[in-house]
Image (cartoon, rainbow, N blue to C red):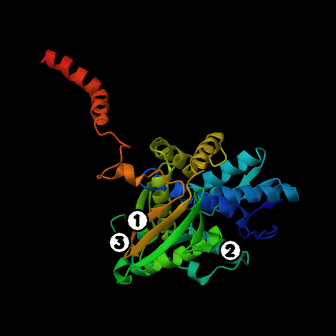
């Protein structure tokens, strides 16, 4: 028996709800958002591949299946993400990948096969659509056909989750997001689930023309690929969480976290979600979020997200010390002279010695 989450004749089909793992993904949203792999690759959809793989393996164990199946092509990254996940969770599992193993290497052949086997195909999938779409609650991506020329501008009619910045309202929208230990927990004072917060943010951000990005990524399998993304709510959450981190994280914590993000991104992008190194990095990031609690106020206007305020009971920002007025002796400006000389010591030594050689 084979377990698959897509349509296939003579095989049990499992339609499953994966919301119990969604909170984990939402809590990692800003981590994924400011990770970059290759040329600014958007990572919003990537955790859903190991999520699907995890559920497939769970079902395979429940029903005694010896194989699982996925519908990813042989050219993309998703085949790697699915299969590395399968093998990590069940090393002896067999994998069926029709795009690689069967004579189904094009959309036309897939539709012909479906028709021959009485598998319904939506009318929107017939013919030669101008692009393909891959959607989840976090974002939607567009790839292929009309977008394969990286010089061509996407048609405005393609976008489904946002208006263009030019068509956005002429008045700004203000919102507030509350965080607890790095997780978004409330929007404008209303306590909501992560999914409900993201749904609401998708609407308000899309209405204000926020969240579009056009990128060329470097795929793990070796080729470059152009994609256009809409991530309205995620764009706001990224800006908000970075803002609350700016007043609650120590400089060393913040810098270390940012230094590790490219490695974290590479692991997730390449499909190593269940690897020990990704789990170790996750533990470190989670540790940094212990005091990331507070409220961020944002201004949304014609494609832009601007942080206009932030507060936290754990804020490390001291207005008395930071002030250019009398700080009541909390900071002795004369100390800066010795600090600077110590920092410059190696450069002064280097300069003296090298000047001797000239």
The answer to whether 283 appears left or right of 154 in the picture is: right
The answer to whether 53 appears left or right of 219 in the picture is: right
- The first of marks 3 and 1 along the sequence is 3
Gap in angstroms between the C-alphas marked 2 and 3: 33 Å
Indicate which disc residue 122 carries: none
Asked whether 304 or 62 is in front, the reply is: 304
Q: Which residue is mark 1?
A: 214
Question: Could you say where residue 291 lies in the image, as x and y percent from the top left?
Answer: 57, 52
Q: Which residue is mark 2?
A: 114
Q: Are marks 1 and 2 in contact (CB under 8 Å)?
A: no
Q: Which residue is pictured at 54% across the width and 61% down the height?
A: 294
Q: Are marks 3 and 1 in contact (CB under 8 Å)?
A: no
Question: Could you say where residue 246 lies in the image, as x and y percent from the top left?
Answer: 45, 54
Instruction: State the SS at label 3.
Output: loop
Mark 3, Cα crowd under 10 Å, few <14 / some 14-19 / many 20+, is few
Q: Which residue is pictured at 52% across the width and 49% down the height?
A: 265
Q: Determine which quarter of the picture holds residue 77.
A: bottom right
- The first of marks 1 and 2 along the sequence is 2
Q: Which residue is most to the left?
A: 358
Is label 3 or label 1 in front? 1
Mark 2, Cα crowd under 10 Å, few <14 / some 14-19 / many 20+, is some
Where 165 sits versus 331, above or below? below
Q: Which residue is mark 3?
A: 153
- The first of marks 2 and 3 along the sequence is 2
């Amino acid at each position: 028996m084979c377990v698959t989450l897509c349509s296939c004749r003579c095989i049990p089909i499992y339609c499953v709800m994966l919301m119990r793992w969604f909170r984990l993904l939402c809590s990692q949203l800003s981590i994924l958002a400011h990770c970059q792999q290759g040329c600014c690759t958007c990572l919003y959809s990537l955790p859903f591949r190991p999520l699907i793989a995890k559920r497939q393996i769970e079902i395979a164990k429940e029903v005694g299946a010896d194989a699982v199946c996925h519908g990813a092509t042989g050219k993309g990254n998703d085949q790697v993400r699915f299969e590395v996940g399968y093998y990590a969770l069940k090393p002896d599992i067999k994998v069926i990948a029709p795009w690689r193993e069967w004579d189904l290497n094009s959309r036309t052949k897939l539709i012909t096969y479906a028709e021959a086997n009485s598998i319904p195909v939506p009318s929107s999938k017939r013919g030669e659509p101008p692009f393909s779409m891959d959607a989840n609650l976090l974002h939607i991506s567009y790839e292929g056909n009309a977008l394969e020329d990286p010089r061509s501008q996407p048609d405005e009619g393609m976008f489904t989750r946002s208006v263009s910045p030019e068509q956005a309202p002429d008045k700004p929208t203000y919102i507030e997001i509350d965080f607890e230990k790095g997780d978004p927990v409330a929007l404008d004072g209303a306590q909501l689930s992560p999914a409900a917060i993201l749904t609401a943010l998708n609407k308000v951000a899309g209405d204000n023309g926020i969240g579009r990005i056009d990128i060329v990524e470097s795929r793990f399998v070796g080729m470059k690929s152009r994609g256009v993304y809409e991530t309205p709510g995620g764009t706001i959450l990224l800006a908000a969480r970075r803002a609350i981190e700016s007043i609650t994280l120590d400089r060393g914590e913040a810098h270390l976290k940012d230094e590790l993000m490219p490695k974290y991104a590479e692991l997730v992008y390449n499909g190593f979600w269940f690897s020990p190194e990704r789990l170790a990095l996750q533990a470190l990031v989670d540790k940094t979020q212990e005091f990331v609690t507070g409220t961020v106020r944002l201004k949304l206007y014609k494609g832009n997200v601007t942080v206009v305020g932030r507060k936290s009971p754990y804020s490390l920002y001291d207005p008395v010390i930071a002030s250019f007025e009398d700080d009541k002796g909390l900071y002795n400006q004369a100390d800066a002279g010795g600090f600077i000389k110590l920092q410059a010591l190696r450069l002064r030594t280097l300069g003296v010695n090298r000047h001797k050689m000239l």
